[in-house]
Image (cartoon, rainbow, N blue to C red):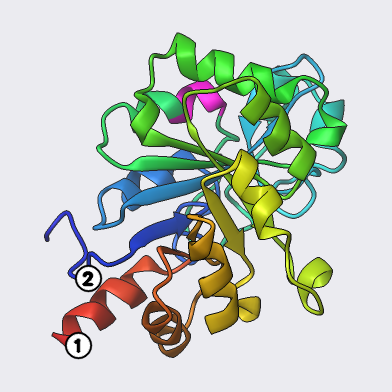
Amino acid sequence: MSNEHSNQSYQLIAHRGLPQDYPENTLIGYQHAFALPIDMLEIDIHYTKDKQLVVIHDDTIDRTSNGKGKVKDYTLEELKKLDFGSYHQGHFEGEQIPTFDEVLDLHSRSSKKLLIEIKKPSQYPGIEKMIVDQLKEEQVPTHKVILQSFDFDSVSKLAHMNVPYELGVLISKKKYWYKSPDFKAIAKIANYINPNYSIVNKHFMEKAHAEHLKVMPYTVNDSKEARKLIDLNIDGIITDIPCLLYTSDAADE
């Protein structure tokens, strides 16, 4: 299989790994995602009670493990004893929560980019610097990382730290279904504006591109919806099912 999807007009991003086939945000899911013709892997970062960076989407462990409670109320050692695989259909019992270190180690053997979302940074004082310090310590090439958050202040903090990585602001449907984002303000701190796909239209794309912002909508799991977005000249697509898109690209050729 080719290492690139056929349509190079946009970037293809695997959301939380391959959550349809493997437990989300796990090393086994990431390994298989990196083997596919994607351009980026999207991951989510929190930290533990003992200030260890871990990769998980929710700020609680209830949905994806056999434990309950907030990520930040557990030590890494405690979290590592829990099962983050059995909730998913399939034979994934005993899959552990990955540390950011472990993901960076896996990523170092891939040419793909990491799209790193900082989740609920207001719950985790100093998390921006911790992530940047870790990236620098592991000597991750700057062109292989994009940092993003729904939290404008968190992205602004990164911008004012003069980090060498590209930055993105995520845009929710809940907050912006009835009004436009402040494209000019976002362009002052970020390179990307990554919205819920349902609020992307021609006007949104024109405003974003006029400010030299790239647009990578989430989470697009329907090939017809993806085609509409591609026709609007989006710059990337964040999806749970990347094969749906690169196989539809091939069918269109």
* Residue at the (53%, 82%) spot, across then down: 202
Q: Is residue 100 above or below residue 59?
A: above
Label 1 Cα neighbours within 10 Å, binned few <14 / some 14-19 / many ≥20:
few
Q: Is residue 107 above or below residue 7?
A: above
Q: Is residue 58 left or right of residue 73?
A: left
Q: Is residue 168 above or below residue 251?
A: above
Q: Quadrant of residue 7?
A: bottom left
Is residue 135 shown in magenta?
no
Instruction: Give, as a three-letter code, the residue at label 1.
Output: Asp
Q: Is residue 138 left or right of residue 163?
A: left
Task: Pick whichever of labels 1 and 2 is earlier in the sequence.
Answer: 2
Q: Which mark is residue 252?
A: 1
Q: Is residue 25 left or right of residue 232?
A: right
Depth check: give the residue in front, 8 or 247: 8
Is residue 101 shown in magenta?
yes
Mark 2 residue element = loop
* Residue at the (57%, 48%) spot, across then down: 85
Quadrant of the rendering where the N terminus is positioned: bottom left
Q: Is residue 172 above or below residue 32?
A: below
The magenta span reads: 99-103
Q: Is residue 122 left or right of residue 247?
A: right
Q: Which mark is residue 7?
A: 2
Q: CA distance from mark 1 to mark 2?
A: 10 Å
Quadrant of the rendering where the C terminus is positioned: bottom left
Q: Are marks 1 and 2 in contact (CB under 8 Å)?
A: yes
Q: Position of residue 237 (x, y in %)?
A: 44, 66
* Residue at the (81%, 79%) spot, across then down: 178
